[in-house]
Image (cartoon, helix red, strand yellow):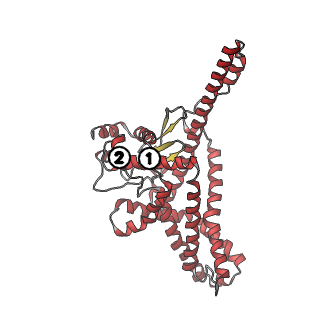
Amino acid sequence: MLLLQNNESENTPSCAAKLPPDFAMGGQAVLEGVMMRGPRRYAIAVRRPQGDIRLTSKPFWPVTTRKPWLKMPIVRGAVSLVEMMLLGYRALDFSARVVEEGQREMDEQENKAAEAVAAEQTAQADQSDTADRSEGVASSPDSPDQCISGWAMAGIFAVSMVLAMGLFVVLPNLTAELIGKFSPGGFKEVSHPLLFNLISGGVRVVIIVLYIWGLSFMHDARRLFQYHGAEHKVVMAFEKGLPLDLEHVRPMTTIHPRCGTAFIAVVLLVSILIFAVLAALLVQFFPGFAQLSRWIHKPIIIALHIVCMPLVAGVAYEFTRKAGRNPNVLFYRVLLAPGMWFQKITTKEPDDSMIEVSLTSFMEALEPEQKEALGNRH
């Protein structure tokens, strides 16, 4: 996933000038396809099992556009992240339905072909049976909004957040607590906040890396990572001002500094600092807090960590945003380096058919004047 933020550099393409201020093309890989979000719409292109591409697009106005007060630094990062996650869920659901529908159609065609052969051989085909099964073929969704309701979206998001907080906040914190309890001399988060959160952050990194690395061995996940690479290649070619065709997109790297993977790495670093400061402030303003038993202060601290996650995301967004604007500054290069390395796992080299899908989605997400400007590159 590419974060949607402006990338002002010397290599800004000619049609980027036609993009709204503070905006850059971005998107996300979905099942057998790519979702791209342009300045005023998003598009989803999915390769069906039959080989053709199913394409849909829909107008999209970010909530920060509708409510300018949400554009405040840090706030805009948390809001944009939630908005992109919700949009990503819709795109994933749509792609899954398209692939499922295509597979069902192929199965239906195979069944009909088998019945036709049987009918030719026996001259006694059962036509009514074929008609009954044909009625079971679902029509293709024309829009992601037809795939998943608002309430279902809220439920999926809530469950995902609970699982994410449990896996990436609660578990690392409790693991660090156990390490501190059984280590020589022992330590707690309230007594050694920086050391504790460095260990907790390290555990968090291990969990994420092992999780993604394990997924990379699954066939469907590997193809998703390939589409992720295709998404990056197309956006990279766009930002370099190259013609958007297979010849020019194919050599592009699959590594991109605005990738959500790089953002996650920054989140991990920022969380260590913010959580350490939080623990230190608790002890500073409530001196008796450190003397409380683990069973009392630990749930309070974990709850505060969860509450502070929007702050962590917002601060990480601002750092990633500035890094995207200043890619040659040493500090930002170091800051983004772990995320760039991590993309070696989350992106894979795509084939030409995947790049074609990504190009189709990208072009559909553009406005007419931007497409015209791109045409002038050839």
Which numbered disc covers residue 290? Answer: none
Q: Is residue 200 above or below residue 147?
A: below
Could you say where residue 310 lies in the image, as x and y percent from the top left?
54, 62
Is residue 195 among what the camera can see? yes
Q: Is residue 368 above or below residue 92?
A: above
Could you say where residue 196 lies in the image, as x and y percent from the top left?
58, 77
Which residue is depicted at the point 47% across and 65% down?
Answer: 266
For disc 1, the neighbor class at 10 Å (few under 14, some 14 to 19, many from 20) is many
Query: Which element type, helix, strand or loop, lies under badge 1?
Result: helix
Could you say where residue 70 lies in the image, as x and y percent from the top left?
48, 56
* Residue type, numbered disc 1: Ala
Query: Which element type, helix, strand or loop, lies under badge 2?
Result: loop
Query: 312 or 214: nearer the eye?
Result: 214
Which residue is depicted at the point 32% across and 45% down?
Answer: 18
* Residue type, numbered disc 2: Leu
On the image, numbered disc 2 is attached to which residue? 19
Q: Is residue 9 above or below residue 30?
A: below
On the image, numbered disc 1 is attached to which residue? 230
Which residue is depicted at the point 30% across and 51% down?
Answer: 12
For disc 2, the neighbor class at 10 Å (few under 14, some 14 to 19, many from 20) is some
* Identity of the residue furthest to the bottom in this view: 185
Q: Is residue 74 left or right of residue 176?
A: left
Which residue is depicted at the point 51% across and 37% down?
Answer: 47
